Amino acid sequence: MNSIIEQLRNRFSEALVAAFGSEFAETDPLVVPASNPKFGDYQSNLAMSLAKTLGQKPREIAQQIVQHLEVSKLCEPAEIAGPGFINLTLKSSYLEARLNAIQSDSQLGAEKAKTPQRVIVDFSSPNIAKEMHVGHLRSTIIGDSIARILEFRNHDVLRLNHVGDWGTQFGMLIAYLREAYPEALTKRDALELEDLVKLYQKAKQRFDEDEEFRENSRQEVVKLQAGEEDSIRAWELLCEQSRREFQVIYSLLDVELTERGESFYNPLLPGVIEDLDYQELTEVDAGAKCVFLEGFTNKAGEPLPLIVQKSNGGYNYATTDLAALRYRIQQDGAERIIYVTDAGQADHFAQVFQVARRAGWIPEGVKGQPDGSPVLVHVPFGLVQGEGGKKLKTRSGETPRLRDLLQEAIARARADLETRLQEEGRTESEEFKDKVARVVGISAVKYADLSQNRTSNYIFSYDKMLSLQGNTAPYMLYAYVRIRGISRKGNINFEQLGTDAEILLQEEAELVLAKHLLQLSDVLKEVEQDLLPNRLCQYLFELSQKFNQFYDRCPVLQASEPQRTSRLVLCHLTARTLKLGLSLLGIPVLERM
RNA sequence: GGGUGCGUAACUCAGUGGAUAGAGUAGCGGACUUCUAAUCCGCCUGUCGCAGGUUCAAAUCCUGCCGCACCCGCCA
């Protein structure tokens, strides 16, 4: 089933050809949702754009298009307004038929991708032996949502956690471990991760201060690279402890990832350099092997190099990213690779992508999507800031640990809940309170992040995200809970309403809600392209608002038939749409709260 | 110095070349014998950073300027 807007586009194209000839068959019919509800539901801006080409007045052109426009099944008669806008309002009979069709569809009318792709979403990517921070939180939340949406659209998605589990910092860590905690090298669980983080800081300090320590560290790197048993064991120990700590966060967030860290690509790095050499892209400059970039210059205006092999023969992150990119295309068969990292890495990815293109690693046929968007996509996001746009920190002035931050959100949600229970004289079990607090707290954190355009910086505020009013997770969870309340109160099993229950749209609030329910498919397609989950958030917020208006104005259980059943169906469709939409944001629903 | 991004209501932010630029919050005023009022309704708030340009039409595209943030040779 084509979406409504696609059908209208086709009809406008046909009308255009009928009115002005086949040379306009490829002209974009410029059909968009109406800019204001008072103009109807959709509008075409075609007439103004053709005025010059056709040498006629826009309103006259609009007249001729409308004369040939066949939309009587979908819409009320088209209206021409202002300089030549063609406005369309959907018929309630058509909306009723569409809603009826959606009832029996487990996807609620949301279409699958016509050509599913093998997509890699690279997100989260914390560093071993370091605490995850708010930047990783953004990457994790946004990346997970993008992956969920693409999965829903039927793409074959590989979610990769490109953890920082290799590199020179391990030399430093192992050297310090040998020096300060030799027992940790052989005994499991001799260190907690918090110690590991402190250990990292101390090791870094030693590294910065002591030349002999620096040399030891370098030796450890060499041993590790050579695969010396002792060193590998130490490395695995460090990774294992970190991994367990990361898992606590991922479990709380309900995020699943396949770990494939930097170390995975280590054996492939020499081959990458060989390939670049073979393509004659590399030059040695000041001892380092470089690819000189097009369009990037240094302070003196000379081409900037991307260093792929350091003067000491070692490799750096650019090499690893190139190896990963090559592997993902050649071995994983990726057709679209999405990197969810902070905006500060934009240059780095642009450089790596350029080198990959010049090396010929991006085969013909996957150089771009049908719409021209590239196969390699950096999805950048802004910084997480504290109140007042300052760096986020705890009361004691430290960078907050992610685990604490999430626990704080849960604790605040719990406090809000207990206050409300007391006010309303309700008693609930501990299990209920735990569950509601956890869902509300975590959902609030996720939604606050996802609901903003990811490219801008984002100000983290518990008070705002947990607020019961406004564009927040609790507002939407509550809308869902209200619907479940109707089901309970009326002792109605929505699933048993049947898929052929009659829908009648009479009240304005019913029509508005119905129209919005039918937009889901278009929104998801948009997010698939633009990778902006805030569009989905906006849709769900508006859906909740429209449902609440309906709820306020249209009694459901007290209505008489056939209106009662019709409204029950609207409630059920809204609940299903909310549940599905929120699930694509990584947010579960609650029966009561 | 070069590059990238941002600049929209008191605050936090949406905004797809289209009509009178929108939400939420805060503020003010209403609506609960009702399916959970965690809701709904109304009012108030604008030099879309500034100046040009392209266009039938610009918050949106282009150029310059101002301000902020981030990046710029062997960290990731």
Image (tube, rainbow, N blue to C red):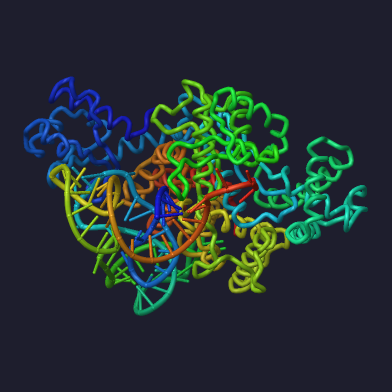
The residue located at (41%, 45%) in the rendering is A561
Q: Quadrant of the N terminus of chain A?
A: top left
The residue located at (57%, 50%) in the rendering is A491
The x and y percentages for residue B8 are 33, 63
The x and y percentages for residue A356 are 53, 30
Depth check: A319 or A501 in front?
A319
Q: Report whether residue A433 is seen.
A: no
The residue located at (60%, 41%) in the rendering is A286
| Position of A75 relative to A575 (above/below) | above
The x and y percentages for residue A283 are 56, 33
Q: Is residue B17 left or right of residue A421?
A: left
Q: Is residue B43 left or right of residue A242?
A: left
Depth check: A582 or A159 in front?
A159
Depth check: B58 or A283 in front?
A283
The x and y percentages for residue A206 are 78, 60
Indicate the quadrant where residue A329 lies: top right
The residue located at (31%, 30%) in the rendering is A7
Q: Is residue A313 left or right of residue A513?
A: right
| Position of A500 relative to A378 (above/below) | above
Q: How many marks?
A: 0
Q: Quadrant of the C terminus of chain A?
A: bottom right
Q: Report whether residue A408 is seen.
A: yes
| Position of A135 relative to A69 (above/below) | below
Which residue of the protein is positioned furthest toward the front in this rendering?
A286
Depth check: A569 or A69 in front?
A69
